[in-house]
């Protein structure tokens, strides 16, 4: 249809931020930094190229994801270690913080829990900002490469995509059969991935990640966490993903525990304060 006479005026309407975030609880980064300075390493997991591994982090501990050997992006799932139904909510994290997250921002859990799961405390790629294409790093836009979309768009049965990698890793960690583990695999934080949207068509794009060996992103665990990280078959995502064509490298996950008393005054965030009645009367209390 042709444009109306007032098309320019309609496009010129100023945007409004959907979720002003100035009232969000602010993480005490100074306290976290002091606790981290005396923390000791308690474990590590090396995630092989085109594969995934699970790891566990206690509330009040830190975990770091580092690029080793070559540029590589990763797909990160987080769950409440005691309840797989509480998991990272990429959509609400995106709505609260933006399409990409960095130091001082949180990974939030799904409804009805909606609380911080992990806070980013260090990010060696924070300098990247937003480039001329609109691209930035550590995205909460994309889902995860998966065999279903691959089959839909190109046919075939590719099993080393992040969805399948995460499914296998969670199955191995929990003992759940594959079909049950798959139900818990969810949208990810795309660690180190550089992405955005094209201005002409609005399509999701990826480009070569600026990550280099030694770059890392580090998190503070706000609750007891089960994590799973896939070293994406797209490598640095400069060409394609969900194939064996890209050069891929491992990713390292390290866990650090602060000294006793280093987090004095801190406690895990409680579940969201909404009463859960939805206008229909009292409901049973939720476990925290």
Image (spheres, rainbow, N blue to C red):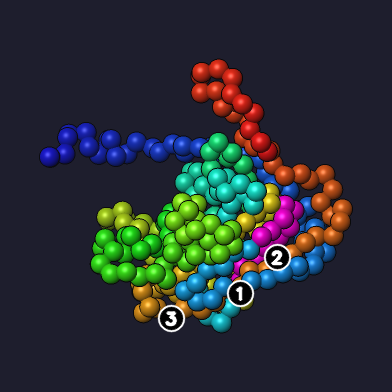
Residue drawn at (28%, 35%) of the image: 10
Quadrant where the C terminus lies?
top right
- How many angstroms separate mark 2 from mark 1 (CA)? 12 Å
Q: Where is mark 2, residue-wise?
A: 255
The tag on residue 235 is none
- How many angstroms separate mark 3 from mark 1 (CA)? 17 Å
**Which-is-in-front pick, marks 3 and 1?**
1
x and y percentages locating residue 91 in the rendered image: 47, 46
Residue drawn at (58%, 40%) of the image: 114
Assign a secondary structure to mark 3.
loop
Please report whichever mark, 2 or 1, sits nearer to the chain's N-terminal start. 1
The tag on residue 46 is 1
Whether residue 170 appears in this view of the structure is: no
Which contiguous range is marked in magenta?
56-66
In the rendered image of this protein, does residue 140 appear above or below residue 3? below
Residue 236: quadrant of the picture: bottom left
x and y percentages locating residue 233 in the rendered image: 43, 72
Residue drawn at (62%, 56%) of the image: 226
Q: Where is mark 3, residue-wise?
A: 247
Whether residue 164 appears in this view of the structure is: yes
Check residue 57 for magenta coloring.
Answer: yes
Magenta: main secondary structure = strand
Assign a secondary structure to mark 2.
strand
Please report whichever mark, 2 or 3, sits nearer to the chain's N-terminal start. 3
């Amino acid at each position: 249809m042709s444009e109306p006479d007032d098309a320019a005026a309609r496009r010129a309407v100023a945007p409004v931020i959907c979720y002003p975030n100035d009232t969000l609880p602010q993480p005490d980064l100074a306290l976290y930094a002091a606790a981290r300075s005396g923390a000791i390493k308690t474990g590590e997991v090396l995630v092989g190229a085109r594969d995934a591994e699970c790891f566990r982090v206690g509330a009040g501990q830190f975990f770091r994801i580092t690029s080793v050997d070559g540029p590589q992006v990763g797909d990160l799932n987080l769950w409440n270690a005691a309840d797989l139904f509480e998991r990272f909510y990429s959509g609400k994290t995106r709505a609260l913080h933006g399409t990409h997250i960095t130091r001082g921002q949180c990974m939030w859990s799904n409804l009805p829990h909606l609380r911080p799961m992990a806070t980013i405390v260090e990010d060696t790629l924070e300098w990247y900002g937003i480039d001329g294409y609109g691209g930035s790093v550590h995205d909460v836009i994309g889902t995860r490469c998966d065999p279903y979309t691959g089959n839909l768009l190109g046919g075939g049965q590719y099993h080393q995509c992040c969805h399948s990698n995460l499914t296998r890793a969670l199955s191995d960690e929990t003992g759940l059969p594959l079909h049950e583990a798959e139900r818990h695999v969810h949208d990810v934080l795309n660690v180190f991935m550089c992405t955005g949207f094209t201005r002409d068509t609005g399509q999701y794009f990826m480009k070569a990640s600026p990550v280099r060996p030694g770059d890392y992103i580090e998190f503070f665990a706000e609750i007891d966490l089960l994590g799973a990280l896939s070293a994406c078959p797209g490598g640095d995502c400069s060409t394609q993903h969900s194939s064996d064509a890209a050069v891929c490298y491992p990713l390292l996950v390290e866990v650090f525990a602060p000294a006793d008393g280093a987090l004095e005054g801190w406690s895990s965030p409680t579940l969201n304060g909404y009463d859960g009645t939805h206008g229909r009367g009292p409901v049973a209390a939720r476990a925290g």
